[in-house]
Every structure is written in C-alpha cells, then in structure tokens.
Image (cartoon, rainbow, N blue to C red):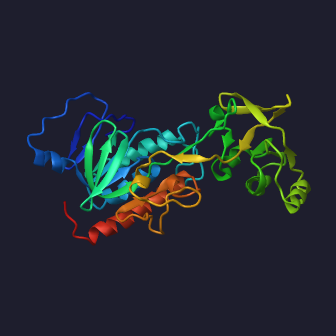
Amino acid sequence: MTKGESITRRTVLKKSGLAIATVVMPIPIKTIPNNSEMKEKNEFDVIIIGGSYSGLSAAMALGRSLKKVLIIDAGDPCNKQTPHSHNFLTQDGKTPAEIASLAREQVLKYKTVSLLNDIAIYGTKTNEIFEIRTRLGELFLGKKLIFSTGIKDIMPKIKGFAACWGISMIHCPYCHGYEFNGQKTGIMSNGDSAFHYAQLVNNLTDDLTILTSGKANFTEAQRIKLASHNIDVIEAEIIAVEHEKGMVEKIVFNDGTKVQFDAIYGSRPFEHNSEIPMLLGCELTEQGYLKVDDMQRTSVKGIFACGDITTPMRSVANAVYTGGLAGAALNMELTTTTELF
C-alpha cells in the first residue's frame, strides 16, 4: 500500500500468505476452497480494534516481531477536525491525517500486519480464543486483543460549539496553546477544573477570562489568586459561539451580551466508541477510562488497551507511546506462552 491510498473492506490484498488488508478497488474476493483455509485466514495472533495512532504503534511493535496482526478500523478519528498536530517530535505542525497516513503506510510494510476498514460490533471469548464480529459480517479469531478505539467527546447544546471543537475550542494547552499565545482567551469551565486550566494557560496570555456559564464555584483562596492575576469570571450562561470556519469570534450569553475571544479552553465529558471491552469484563477507572496496569494490560487476561481510552493525557505522542508499550508487552506474553489455535 502506498501513501495516499484509501482503504475499503471487500478487497483482499494477500501479503506473504498471512494477512488480510483492504484497498479501494472493487476486486472480488477469491473463492475460498474449504473451511479450514477460511479458518486459518481469519485467525490472528493479535486483533487490534482501532487503527489510529496508538493502534498502529502497537501493530508496528508486533509486526516487527513477525506476529500475525489484524487491525480493524472505521477511519473516523476524534481529531479529524483538528487542523494541525503539535508537541510531537518530527511531526510538529503536520495535520493529523498526514501523520496517520504515513503511519499506515509504514506499518503495512510489515508482511504479517493487515488492516480492515470495518467496525467491530461484538466480542466474546471461547476456550482462550477471542472472537470478534464486525458490522459487515466478518468473523475473526485472535489469541489476544488490543483495544485502541478512542473516545467520543460529547458536545454541549451550544450553537457553534461543535464546529469549533479542536480548532479554536480546545482542550489541551500543550497541543494547541502556543498557537494562541498572547491572544484573548477564555476558559469554559468552573471550580477546580477552571482553576487548573488558569494555572496552565496564564503564562500564555495576559488576557484570560473564565466562563462558568452559571454561578462560579471557587474557594476563597482560588478567588484571591485569580484576582491577583487579573483573571475575570463571567457567570452568564453561554448560548452560542459565533465563528468563521471554526475560528471563534464571539461568545454569546443569555443576557444578550457578546464578548470577543480568539480561543476557548475546556474539557468535555466523553463516551467510549466501543462497548466491547466492557462486555468482555474490562474494568473502568473512576474517570471512566479503561483500567490498565503499567504494561497496558486490562483487568481481563489477554486484553490490552492503549491510547485515549486509557488516560486523560490525550495527545498523539502519548497515544504512540502507550501503543508501542502495549504491543511490546503483548508480544512478550505471546513469546513466553505455548498457546495455539
């Protein structure tokens, strides 16, 4: 597969007799002569559900160890709207799509790694083997699973907010803050969360305002600290965001006022893109992330997880790190076991 090729499910690219990959051309699938061959083609050492940065990183570690790997990915990353990625060495300033495209190209050069454009919808474990079924009716068997399915941010019912999310309505000062330094900045949050953002962002701009969209909930010590740094607090409810192609221009409040801003920070509640880990028994943390140990193992034997579903530290660099760690740790488990299909 070359850079720039898109992928679809129904074409099979045979790679050293081991892997299934998908490409855009509508070539019919070769007839499979018997059930045993079909079973072999659908069996993998590892099935990785989710093929963005963390999943691809895990696949590279496993592919370099000649493990037979299937990545199942829907091609709908959470940062698809973000114009540029930052704070990742060698990739600073590139678009998320550029980074992902190059990553896929490099990972799929490993002959035992395959990529399927589909969505995993069901999983079960039978006799130490995991079975994964996809939306398009495929069934795959794996000795181990890695979940790197990511999370979906839940947008507030504020007109214009979603169109700006990841562009000028941002969650991470390390990923986006430098680009808005010295500009009029808001923090859409309250209480400890808003105060934490203020601590992180205060050195990036002298024009900072907290937007609580309701009664402010700060301790007296926090109020004094905010005032000492000339950080204003607006309690009026936010009803809309005026913007131009995702770039914030004004925040509209329910009292009819409008205030100009260049960027707004804030975190959002989230939901998991896949319920399969929980259906298989994986535990969650109090924050709602998949619970993993220091080797990215979940609470269920044979299941690993990486990327945004495991940590609030959401960045491309961290996703790549946790994916690489998961792949290496899982490979060690495969290497030191005699499990066979």
- 232 horizontally vs 332: left or right: right
Quarter of the image where the N terminus is located: top left
Residue 115 can be seen in this image: no
Residue reaching furthest to the bottom: 336
Instruction: Give whichever of 8, 120 is nearer the camera.
Output: 120
> Residue 286 location, x and y as percent?
58, 60
| Residue at x 65%, y 28% (from the top left corner) | 245
> Residue 300 location, x and y as percent?
39, 63
> Residue 8 location, x and y as percent?
33, 34
Residue 137 can be seen in this image: yes
| Residue at x 23%, y 38% (from the top left corner) | 12
| Residue at x 76%, y 37% (from the top left corner) | 262
Q: Above or below — where is 295 with respect to 245?
A: below
Q: Above or below — where is 254 with respect to 77?
A: above
* Residue 252 lies in quadrant: top right
Q: Above or below — where is 44 with respect to 93?
A: below
- 115 horizontally vs 17: left or right: right
- 267 horizontally vs 289: left or right: right
Instruction: Give whichever of 238, 209 is nearer the camera.
Output: 238
Quarter of the image where the C terminus is located: bottom left
Number of marks in the image? 0
| Residue at x 26%, y 62% (from the top left corner) | 128
> Residue 132 location, x and y as percent?
31, 48
* Residue 227 lies in quadrant: bottom right
